[in-house]
Amino acid sequence: MTPMPRTKVLVQIRIQAAERDRWTRAATVEHLRLGEMLRLAVRNHVAEVERLRLLAREATPSRPSAA
């Protein structure tokens, strides 16, 4: 088997590095998107819990003070 020419090996290494960088950037963007989705879900959940607490407080008759 004949060895590959040096320039062909260097070109392959460059292509592999470019491909790795592209996938790294894509993963970073996806990570940021997932983080934003998670923050939005938590924000919505907290708003819903607060809304339910307010409804529960309004639905519960207030107790007269023992003064």
Image (cartoon, helix red, strand yellow):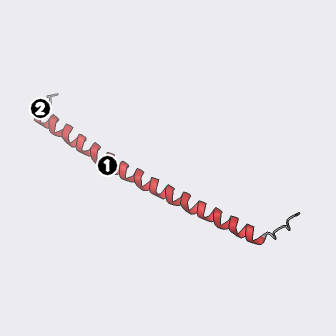
Under circle 1, the secondary element is helix
Of 18 and 58, which appears nearest the observer? 58
Q: Is residue 14 left or right of residue 59?
A: left
Q: In this view, does 48 lie to the left or right of 1?
A: right
Mark 1 and mark 2 in contact (Cβ < 8 Å)? no
Name which of mark 2 and mark 1 comes first in the sequence: 2
Q: Is residue 60 visible?
A: yes
Q: Is residue 8 left or right of residue 27?
A: left
Instruction: Establish if 20 lies above or below 29.
Output: above
Which of the 4 image quarters holds residue 56? bottom right
Q: Position of residue 15 (x, y in %)?
A: 21, 43
Of 46 and 63, which appears nearest the observer? 63
Q: Which of labels 2 and 1 is toward the front?
A: 1
The residue tagged 1 is: 25
Q: In this view, does 29 lie to the left or right of 66?
A: left
Q: How crowded is mark 2: few (under 14 residues within 10 Å), some or many (20 or more)?
A: few
Of 57 and 48, which appears nearest the observer? 57
Q: Where is residue 64 in the image (x, y as percent from the top left)?
A: 86, 68
- Toward the right, the furthest residue is 66
Q: Residue 6 carries which label?
A: 2
Q: What residue type is labelled 1?
A: Arg
